[in-house]
Image: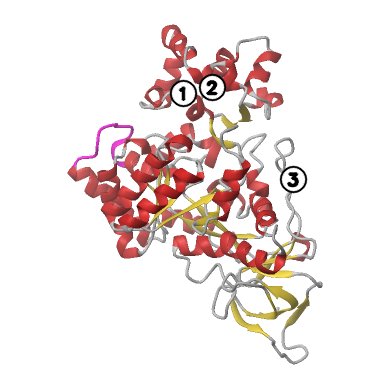
Amino acid sequence: MNSRMLLRGGLVADGIGATVQRADVLIEGPVIAAVGHVDVSPGECAEIGLAPGSVVCPGFIDAHVHAEGPLLAGGRVDGALAQGVTTLVAGQDGQSWIGANAATAGYLNRYFAPVNGALEPARDFSVADFGAAVTGRLMQNVAVLASQGTIRHNITGMTSRPLDETERAAARRQVEDALAEGAVGLSSGLDYLPSRFGGVEETAELARPLAGAGRPYVSHLRGYGPDVRAGLGELVAVGLGAGIRVHASHLWGEPGDLDAAFTAADRAGVALTYDMYSYRKSSTILASLLLPPEVQAQGPEHTLAVLADPGQRAALLGTEKLTGDYLHNVYLGTVPESMASCAGLPVAEAAARDSRPPGEWVLDLLVTAGLNAGGHLDRPALTDASLAWISTCDRHCAGSDGIYQGQHPHPRGYGAFARLAGHYLADGPETGYQRLARHLAAGAADAYGLRDRGRIAPGMAADICVIGPDGLAPHATYDAPRRMATGAELVLVNGAVVWPPARATAGQYPGRMVG
């Protein structure tokens, strides 16, 4: 097989300049060798002529995705590949079983499997163990974050108090070990348990090893929407305390609040970036959407005991999140197979089919599922205008927050990048494709320190997405969430064609764990 390849006749959106340029791209092995007018002798390399109007972009980087389960199982995420995503950043929200000990992996299998999938059998599974397990089996690249909640559980389980000095030192060593094994940062998920038990001072101490490594602290904030300024304030305080840059996961709120928080971060001298997708609905574990944190604070068995206790159950049914009005906006994603016909429905509608009050019905669902249920929340306060502002800001990079578990996943895992492409191209392709390349590739590469990815230039990794003349188009919807995007005519990972499947070389697995 010829290790040299020439992409000829396309426009290049390199993620660097202001406008696209007509240029050839020469690839040698896993690296881009030249960009411009390239002369080669006949037979010197495999030459691929691109259709007029094709645009050669850097392979896209999903800054926030729950892909560890699919990658461990099959080495690829086709819903992402079809959109030109060549690198996936996993280990998000502080809750990954990558980096877990056996007890923590068992807990996460009970608590967070509707998001990440389960690690079976539950076992000690370090960043290095994950890297070894996927080496030689990947069609895409993966970058891995260490997870603050996972590390906390490794040390103290579900203890809600602050870590003492000895425990903090042990947690910091686990962060250092993860970085030495290839992690590209540290994540937290302050809506989740036990991640939410970590305060600013404790988290900053855990995050200090990131400074020497030049890696970010990445957080699912404690507050979004009307609480986003406080959420970003906590993020910036950790960054200031640790002397590091910070990154907010799936950020949303009013533009005025966000802009004020960004200004405060700049004044504090803390570099701040964020990711977001362009959908109004969110998606997560159903227990997190509906149950107070204190009900979940002692672990799954305690939570299930609360749901079975008549008095405590009655108190829960009096809370706002178990009312019919709220449950009209909660849609079922992952449910037990015996209830699969309900997947995709609002909780209130599914309950009405059984002629039952929605609050009682959904608590019974959680018990039946052993808490292994996921759902999507509609957020009417998140307007199209706010989403457009969020996607346009220079601090933004694309993150699908894709979840690939359950009968009815959110469509963002199959359409977020294609959908964002339409936003950047609204003002025309000449400058639009460069904005697309920066938001869908270069921004995430900079945020995570992936220095040889995210741009098209000599010496960079040959991760490439060629978008055809008709552009990148999403087809996944809330009713049909797994429909593949179209328009990524050719996707290369480290110089090898991986998409479409008919053009990929059988038996080639060019993906890597990158950092």
Quadrant of image for the N terminus: bottom right
Q: At x 29% / y 54%, what residue is drawn?
A: 240
Residue 397, image x, y percentages: 54, 56
Judge left or right: residue 335 versus residue 429. Answer: left
User: At label 3, which amino acid type do we have?
Assistant: Arg
Dots 3, 1 in contact, CB < 8 A: no
At label 2, the amino acid type is Leu
Disc 2: which residue? 366
Residue numbers of the magenta segment: 155-164
Q: Is residue 182 visible?
A: yes
Disc number placed over residue 483 in the picture, else none = 3
164 over 503 or under it: above or below: above
Q: Is residue 29 magenta?
A: no
Which mark, residue 291?
Answer: 1
Residue 335 in view of the camera: no
Q: Residue at x 59, y 59 (%)?
A: 440
Q: Residue at x 71, y 25 (%)?
A: 341
For label 3, count other residues whose C-alpha is less than 10 Å away and answer few (under 14), some (14-19) or many (20+).
Answer: some
Question: For the image shown, how many numbered marks are present on the structure?
Answer: 3
C-alpha separation, residue under disc 3 versus residue under disc 2: 28 Å
- Res. 326 mark: none
Which secondary structure, mark 3?
loop
The residue most toward the left is 165
Among the two numbered marks 3 and 2 on one chain, the one whose residue lies closer to the N terminus? 2
Nearer-N-terminus badge (3/1): 1
Residue 198, image x and y in percent?
31, 39
Q: Give the alpha-carbon distance from disc 1 to disc 2, as whole Å.
A: 10 Å
Q: Are marks 1 and 2 in contact (CB under 8 Å)?
A: yes
